[in-house]
């Protein structure tokens, strides 16, 4: 979260220790990090907010980047289990879900464009018409909290149900029953 002047709030500010942790998580130096958007319940950086343009000028439309290895492994497991295909199919038949997902996409674009416009409506994760990357959706939901990205929230609930509640995901994250979704 940022303050009213756009600077990261105290719990989201990046320090050298955070950057070292993120580098170890990624296995490379992080690029363009402007804040730690989500920390695990034990305070470890797990989602970084990245500048829309990297220091070398390369466009980087993925505003929120998942870094915690537990979360990235679970996102990959969910992808392999076919969760993205199921979510995409539901978008095609559930107008309310599709509208909420489009709203998440528009919010993502507005937030990124407030930092720097890339002149594109690509947001990441397949938004707004399909689900292409659960890593992006999980990162977006953890950064913004429940209620912004319905499919990201669902993916976080699935990850929480698979053993990450209380470690990588807050204890109070809405569970699958609250999200009214079936476990794959």
Image (cartoon, rainbow, N blue to C red):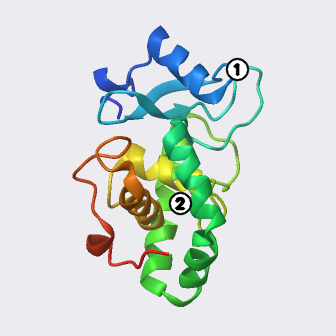
- Residue found 33% across the figure and 70% down from its top: 176
Q: Nearer the viewer, residue 12 or 8?
A: 12
Residue 35 vertical position relative to residue 161 in the rendered view, above or below? above
Q: Position of residue 107 (x, y in %)?
A: 46, 55
Q: Answer whether residue 28 is visible to the viewer in this image.
A: yes
- How many numbered marks have been drawn onto this rendered protein structure? 2
For disc 1, the neighbor class at 10 Å (few under 14, some 14 to 19, many from 20) is few
Q: Position of residue 169 (x, y in %)?
A: 35, 46
Q: CA distance from mark 1 to mark 2?
A: 25 Å
Compared across the picture, whether 172 is left or right of 17 comes to left
Q: Nearer the viewer, residue 61 or 139?
A: 139
Residue on which the image places disc 2 = 105
Residue on which the image places disc 1 = 55
Q: Position of residue 132 (x, y in %)?
A: 67, 63
Q: Quadrant of residue 161?
A: bottom left
Q: Nearer the viewer, residue 159 or 108?
A: 159
- Residue found 60% across the figure and 83% down from its top: 89
């Amino acid at each position: 979260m940022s303050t009213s002047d756009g600077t990261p709030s105290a719990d989201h500010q990046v320090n050298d220790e955070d950057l070292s942790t993120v580098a170890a998580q990624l296995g490379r130096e992080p690029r363009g990090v402007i804040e730690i958007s989500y920390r695990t319940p034990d305070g470890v950086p797990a989602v970084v907010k990245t500048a829309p343009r990297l220091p070398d000028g390369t466009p980087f439309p993925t505003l929120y980047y998942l870094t915690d290895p537990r979360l990235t492994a679970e996102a990959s497991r969910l992808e392999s289990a076919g969760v993205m295909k199921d979510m995409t199919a539901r978008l095609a038949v559930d107008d309310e879900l599709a509208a909420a997902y489009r709203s998440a996409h528009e919010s993502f674009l507005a937030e990124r464009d407030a930092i720097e416009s890339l002149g594109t409506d690509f947001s990441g994760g397949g938004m707004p018409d399909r689900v292409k990357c659960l890593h992006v959706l999980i990162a977006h939901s953890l950064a913004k909290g429940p209620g912004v990205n319905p499919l990201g929230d669902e993916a976080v609930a699935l990850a929480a149900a698979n053993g990450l509640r209380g470690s990588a995901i807050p204890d109070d994250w809405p569970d699958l029953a609250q999200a009214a979704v079936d476990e794959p």
